[in-house]
Image (cartoon, rainbow, N blue to C red):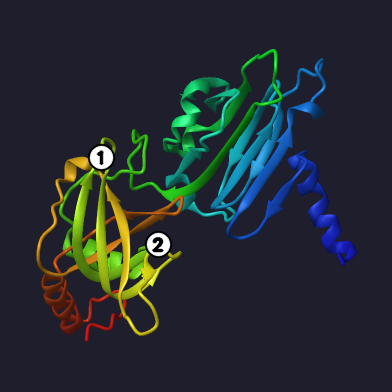
């Protein structure tokens, strides 16, 4: 039960959303609305505020337009360096999606491109999402639906996808990746499948230090092995080979993306040197 003080704090926020469904938490924020509730003669554009690191939007039977403001749930100077990535569902359609910066629109995703499910990324400073319904005689089968995530702006201001450029990681980058990435594991490459937009690296993990979500499946209680796949840009030219690696990276929309992946013996040498110098940012069990 809400106290009078808490209710007085939440009421302005709920009025600000002006939406039919809004879920707030530290990890996810989602919105679900319907164009059927929008009066045909109304000329105002509804504002939607999502202040979360990840979530989803579902707009049933879209008519008119909405503006979606995506912001982190904390106030920090680092927020200006964030990127926003959206991934439409395979059934999404019925709208064109633009970036709206001070009234100037830039097309981000056409209606016919939704079904491809391709991830689109942009700097948070590029503005809000302006989602405009495309007129159709029958709107009963039209749904605009996508997931979104706020990510650190490693991608660069002109990046349009989650792919990072291929380059060797520095010693500092390797040590930081072990401490901060979504997954860290020691293992080997089983095979590599080359696809048009990315490469998929099938790996077997002998020691799993961390995984944000379960992207690697366990072989069982008695088998201390995990298997899974990690995506990489196709231009990286990764190949299956012998030896052990330390796999690190990020999880985006439920998929693992490769970050730094040094050979394990090289990481071990680097880690031990930093340990002796007292410069390791965190401790890792290397036995």
Point out residue 205 in the picture as x, y percentages from the top left corner. Answer: 27, 70
Q: Quadrant of residue 39?
A: top right
Q: Quadrant of the N terminus?
A: bottom right
Q: Is residue 91 above or below residue 240?
A: above
What residue do we see at 66% from left, 14% from top? 136
Location of residue 180 (image quadrant):
bottom left
Identify the residue at image location x=11%, y=70%.
266
Identity of the residue drawn at 27% across and 42% down: 198
Q: Pick whichever, 197 or 165, lies toward us.
A: 197
x and y, in percent, of residue 97 in the image: 54, 26
Q: Is residue 164 above or below residue 128?
A: below
**Please, what secondary structure does the residue beneath circle 2 have?**
loop
Q: Quadrant of residue 35?
A: top right
Give the residue at mark 1.
Answer: 195
Mark 1 surroundings: few (<14), some (14-19) or many (≥20) residues within 10 A? few
User: Residue at label 2?
Assistant: 215
Q: Is residue 63 left or right of residue 166?
A: right
Q: Position of residue 151 (x, y in %)?
A: 43, 49
Q: Residue furthest right?
A: 4
């Amino acid at each position: 039960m809400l106290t009078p003080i808490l209710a007085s704090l939440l009421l302005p926020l709920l009025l600000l959303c002006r939406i039919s469904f809004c879920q707030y938490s530290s990890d996810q924020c989602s919105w679900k609305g319907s164009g059927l509730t929008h009066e045909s003669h109304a000329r105002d554009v509804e504002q939607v505020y999502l202040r979360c690191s990840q979530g989803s939007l579902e707009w049933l039977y879209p008519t008119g337009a909405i503006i979606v403001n995506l912001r982190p749930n904390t106030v920090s100077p680092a927020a200006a360096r964030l990127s926003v990535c959206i991934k439409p569902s395979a059934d999404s359609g019925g709208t064109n999606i633009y970036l709206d910066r001070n009234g100037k629109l830039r097309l981000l995703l056409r209606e016919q491109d939704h079904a491809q499910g391709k991830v689109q990324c942009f700097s948070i400073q590029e503005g809000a999402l302006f989602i405009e319904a495309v007129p159709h005689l029958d709107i009963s089968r039209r749904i605009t639906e996508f997931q979104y995530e706020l990510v650190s702006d490693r991608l660069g201001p002109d990046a349009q996808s989650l792919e990072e450029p291929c380059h060797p990681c520095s010693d500092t980058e390797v040590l930081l990746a072990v401490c901060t990435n979504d997954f860290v594991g020691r293992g080997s490459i089983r095979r590599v499948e080359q696809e048009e937009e990315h490469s998929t690296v099938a790996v077997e993990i002998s020691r799993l230090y961390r995984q944000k979500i379960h992207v690697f499946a366990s072989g069982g209680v008695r088998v201390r092995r995990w298997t899974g796949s990690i995506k990489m840009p196709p231009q990286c030219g990764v190949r299956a080979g012998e030896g052990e690696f330390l796999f690190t990276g990020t999880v985006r929309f439920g998929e693992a993306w490769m970050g730094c992946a040094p050979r394990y013996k090289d990481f071990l040498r680097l880690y031990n040197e930093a340990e002796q110098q007292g410069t390791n940012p965190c401790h890792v069990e290397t036995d």
